[in-house]
């Protein structure tokens, strides 16, 4: 009868005569839900539930019981059953309970899949690059993530501070709890305290109700304070109290609330210099920098640029809708030789601009921004054979100077510009190496063609 009713409701149903037969069916073709009587010969419903929990802990089980044994059904739920229905069975109620159970576990599976996706997205292994500087940092960050210690990330703008902070959170014991971020430099000073710590109704003009601050939102999780160097000195005292005592006091409140928050802060500023000029508290600095992490700028990890370049190029092509666009490998040295003052963010923006504005099916040197076209690949400049017994850097520099001078007929201004140094620096190096133009019996009359003195 139950099979007929459930099939009419649209479900595929298999039946078993007893608990042992049910286990064989579950092992052969894992169902989405088990509906079992509590009292059965041989293996009881409670025993069946126990074996299901041991082997298939996520499989929902609904218990059927007589009215007089509801206490046993409650005990079954304590042991992991999803719900129970009583005899005589109301079939509409049964279908509703089955539907609710399947929907619940579908949502549980969606959350699990989403969390797995987040873990992959924010794992340390997904921070792109294999340079020694980056791998050393990520190794330290992974070990720090397992603790509750405060972390201070020091890095230039555009290096990916928040990405690193998220990776730390999602690889920490707090990964199931909130990750809340606030940029201390992006919020007006007079609003930052309320945004961070919250306020009570009527605490200031415009406070029409109670507001929960970012700190309380992050309770049991991680609070990421970006650009901590921009925090006003008067708020640094409250942040210090939060770290030391685990307390937060809302604006206008008469008492503090206890919170459990892990702090990860980041800055591009020199906090030690700020301590000296009185704009940052020394005691707060040492509380934040229990574990200091130095995120290297892009110019110090040039070997990571090709990988980053291809990653951003693929993303930009998908975003703009140009899947067939090609970026030749011959252009990569132009990107590697540039210093990228805006770091990874600048690289990402430049790549997207190239994908949007390039005219042909392949990006060319002419498509590159002027500042990248200036960066001549070193492979085009020199072809060096490195001898196994070593080589003299002084000799290479001297030879390079002579060749540059000869290329421009010993015109020092042109040679210096070609070498990307000042004429004064060129003259110094000529003097250092004793370089003089050989007498040819001719004089071009140019002051710049005379030897260095």
Image (spheres, rainbow, N blue to C red):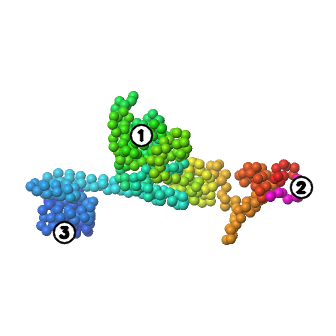
Query: Residue at point 27% right, 53% down?
Result: 104
In the image, residue 237 lies at what x, y percent? 43, 39
In x, y percent, where is residue 141? Answer: 46, 56
SS at badge 2: loop
The secondary element bearing badge 1 is classed as helix
- Boundaries of the magenta span: 434-443
Position of residue 88 in the picture relative to residue 412 (left or right): left
SS under mark 3: helix
The quadrant the N terminus occupies is bottom left
Q: Which residue is mark 2?
A: 442
Look at mark 1 in the image and give the residue it sits on. Answer: 238
Residue 389 at what x, y percent from top left?
68, 71
Q: Is residue 76 visible?
A: yes
Residue at 76% across, 55% down:
429
Residue 324 vertical position relative to residue 251 in the rendered view, above or below: below
In terms of secondary structure, what is the magenta stretch mainly? loop
Please rate how many residues cluster around mark 3, counting C-alpha atoms within 10 Å: few if below 14, some from 14 to 19, many from 20.
few
* Camera-side residue of 63 and 330: 63
Of the numbered discs in the image, which one, if any, rests on residue 168? none
Farthest residue to the bottom: give it: 388
Q: Residues within 10 Å of mark 2 (few under 14, many from 20)?
A: few
Instruction: Using residue 181 as the reference point, say whether residue 36 is left or right of it.
Output: left
- Examine the rendered structure and indicate whether residue 28 appears above or below residue 278: below
**Disc 3 designates what residue?**
21
């Amino acid at each position: 009868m139950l099979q007929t009713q459930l099939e009419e409701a649209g479900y595929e149903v298999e039946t078993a005569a007893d608990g042992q037969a049910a286990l064989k069916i579950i092992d052969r073709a894992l169902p989405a839900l088990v509906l079992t009587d509590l009292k059965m010969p041989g293996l009881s419903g409670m025993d069946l539930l126990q074996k299901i929990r041991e082997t298939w802990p996520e499989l929902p089980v609904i218990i059927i019981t007589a009215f007089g044994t509801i206490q046993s059904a409650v005990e079954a739920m304590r042991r992991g059953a999803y719900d129970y229905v009583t005899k005589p069975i109301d079939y509409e109620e049964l279908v509703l309970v089955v539907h609710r159970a399947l929907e619940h576990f579908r949502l549980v599976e969606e959350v699990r899949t989403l969390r797995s996706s987040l873990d992959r997205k924010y794992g340390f292994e997904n921070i792109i690059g294999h340079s020694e500087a980056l791998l050393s940092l990520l190794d330290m960050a992974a070990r720090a993530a397992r603790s509750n210690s405060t972390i201070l990330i020091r890095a230039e703008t555009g290096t990916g501070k928040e990405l690193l902070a998220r990776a730390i959170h999602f690889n920490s014991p707090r990964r199931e709890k909130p990750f809340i971020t606030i940029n201390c430099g992006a919020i007006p000073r007079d609003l930052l305290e309320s945004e961070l710590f919250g306020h009570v109704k009527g605490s200031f003009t415009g406070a029409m109700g109670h507001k929960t601050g970012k700190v309380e939102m992050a309770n049991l999780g991680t609070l990421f304070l970006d650009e901590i160097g921009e925090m006003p000195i008067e708020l640094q005292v409250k942040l210090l109290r939060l770290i030391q005592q685990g307390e937060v006091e809302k604006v206008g409140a008469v008492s503090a609330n206890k919170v459990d928050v892990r702090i990860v802060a980041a800055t591009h500023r020199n906090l030690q210099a700020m301590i000296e000029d009185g704009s940052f508290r020394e005691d707060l600095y040492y509380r934040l920098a229990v574990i200091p992490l130095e995120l290297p700028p892009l110019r110090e990890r040039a070997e990571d640029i090709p990988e980053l370049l291809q990653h951003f190029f693929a993303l930009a092509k998908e975003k703009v809708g140009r899947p067939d666009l090609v970026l030749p490998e011959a252009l990569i040295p132009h990107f590697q030789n540039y210093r990228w003052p805006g770091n990874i963010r600048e690289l990402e923006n430049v790549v997207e601009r190239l994908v949007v504005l390039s005219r042909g099916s392949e990006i060319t040197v002419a498509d590159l921004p002027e500042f990248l076209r200036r960066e001549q690949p070193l492979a085009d400049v020199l072809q060096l054979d490195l001898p196994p017994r070593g080589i003299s850097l002084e000799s290479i520099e001297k030879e390079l100077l002579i060749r540059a001078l000869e290329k421009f007929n010993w015109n020092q201004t042109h040679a210096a510009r070609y070498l990307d140094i000042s004429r004064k620096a060129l003259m110094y190096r000529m003097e250092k190496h004793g370089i003089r133009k050989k007498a040819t019996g001719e004089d071009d009359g140019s002051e710049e063609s005379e030897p260095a003195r």
